[in-house]
């Protein structure tokens, strides 16, 4: 059985590497205009370090390719997106951006931070989108040219981007060298990577939801690539947004906790596994290459909840079983 699973995983990685020549590498653009508290300010070393961490988190997805159309309003076209302010003063504070230009093969992610006296580490969401104008323009806003996202049962995703908020009350580790991470610190790189994955549709898209099925003890994910990597239907958490606790993937043939499960102990850094990448392939991303663990820096996080379409994270004080 073990050799069969290894063969399936090897075949999976080969399949993921065979991508269309018309696909282009995904570019993640961070927008700091709503960072009103200066957490990512270029006027401070701390802010610059946090920006570097975000860029490193984005590089985790450098192996994803697709052909996303630009969102560029023409005459008679208009669109807006309303999302939670990334430096909010209360959970109900929202912001609206109108006629944002999103380049082709790119996502725009607004980031910021504010202090919240609670255990939530961060949250990400894509907001509520409205568009009007030509049908081609409306479709470009909704699915970025990914026709499978318009199917009755969606098999693809074409997001515009989203917003990520970080809880600045914590003493975050904002370094790239894992050896500097203290036992009582949440890892900014880990958290940022996890939240970006949600904006890519992991646990937060119609294509993901279409692959969920009820099971005796909750829900399972039925995506072909993920099932091949795991060796069976993959258990997910109670809200259907992450892998279930205890589900493991592999990196270089070694079993590891999945970056996209619900929790990680403070002081830990986790890495995207073959199973995490496989799920992104199942919801429509083309995975052209899997970065070596030494060149990508993955996610920590905690208990998952859902606030609208936001994925909220809370730290866990207990190690995973």
Image: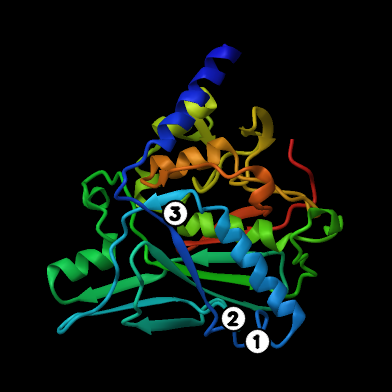
Q: Which residue is mark 2?
A: 87
**Gap in angstroms between the C-alphas marked 3 and 2:** 22 Å
Q: Which residue is mark 1?
A: 37
- Considering the image in quadrants, where does the N terminus appear? top right
Q: Which residue is mark 3?
A: 204
First of labels 2, 1 by sequence position:
1
Query: Residue 76 falls in which quadrant of the image?
Result: bottom left
Does the CB distance between marks 2 and 1 fall below 8 Å? yes
- Considering the image in quadrants, where does the C terminus appear? top right
Identify the residue at image location x=54%, y=84%: 34
Is the residue 104 above or below the residue 239 in the image?
below
Residue 229 image point, x, y percent: 51, 28
Nearest to the observer: residue 160 or residue 169: 160
**Gap in angstroms between the C-alphas marked 2 and 1:** 7 Å
Q: In this rendering, would 82 be left or right of 150?
A: right
Residue neighbourhood size for the residue with mark 3, other residues' Cα within 10 Å, grouped as few (<14), some (14–19), many (≥20): many
Query: Residue 291 falls in which quadrant of the image?
Result: top right
SS at mark 3? loop
Q: In this rendering, would 156 be left or right of 114?
A: left
Residue 319 image point, x, y percent: 78, 43
Residue neighbourhood size for the residue with mark 1, other residues' Cα within 10 Å, grouped as few (<14), some (14–19), many (≥20): some
Identify the residue at image location x=65%, y=79%: 40
- Residue 214 appears in the rendering: no
- Residue 243 appears in the rendering: yes
SS at mark 2? loop
Which residue is most to the front? 21
Residue 282 image point, x, y percent: 40, 40
Identify the residue at image location x=19%, y=76%: 132
Residue neighbourhood size for the residue with mark 2, other residues' Cα within 10 Å, grouped as few (<14), some (14–19), many (≥20): many
* Label number found at residue 283: none
**Gap in angstroms between the C-alphas marked 1 and 3:** 28 Å
């Amino acid at each position: 059985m073990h050799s069969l699973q290894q063969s399936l995983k090897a075949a999976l990685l080969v399949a993921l590497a065979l991508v269309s020549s018309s696909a282009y590498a995904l570019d993640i653009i961070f927008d700091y205009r709503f960072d009103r508290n200066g957490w990512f300010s270029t006027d401070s070393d701390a802010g610059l370090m946090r920006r570097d961490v975000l860029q490193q988190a984005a590089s985790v997805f450098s192996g994803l390719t697709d052909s996303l159309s630009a969102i560029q309003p023409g005459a008679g076209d208009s669109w807006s997106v309303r999302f939670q302010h990334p430096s909010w003063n209360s959970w109900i504070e929202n912001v609206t951006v109108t006629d944002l230009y999103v380049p082709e093969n790119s996502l725009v992610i607004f980031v910021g931070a504010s202090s919240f006296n609670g255990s939530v580490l961060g949250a990400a969401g894509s907001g509520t989108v409205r568009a009007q104008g030509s049908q081609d323009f409306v479709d470009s806003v909704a699915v970025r040219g990914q026709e499978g996202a318009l199917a009755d049962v969606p098999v693809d995703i074409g997001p515009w981007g989203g917003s990520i908020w970080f809880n600045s009350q914590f003493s975050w580790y904002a370094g790239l060298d894992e050896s500097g991470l203290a036992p009582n610190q949440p890892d900014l790189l880990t958290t940022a990577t996890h939240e970006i994955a949600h904006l890519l549709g992991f646990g937060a898209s119609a294509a993901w939801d279409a692959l969920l099925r009820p099971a005796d003890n909750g829900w399972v994910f039925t995506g072909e690539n993920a099932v091949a990597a795991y060796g069976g239907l993959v258990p997910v958490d109670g809200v259907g947004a992450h892998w279930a606790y205890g589900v493991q993937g592999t990196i270089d043939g070694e079993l590891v906790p999945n970056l996209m499960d619900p929790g990680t102990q403070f002081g830990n850094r986790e890495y995207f596994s073959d199973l995490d990448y496989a799920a992104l392939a199942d919801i429509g991303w083309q995975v052209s290459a899997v970065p070596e663990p030494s060149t990508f820096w993955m996610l920590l996080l905690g208990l998952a909840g859902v606030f609208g379409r936001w994925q909220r994270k809370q730290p866990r004080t207990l190690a995973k079983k």
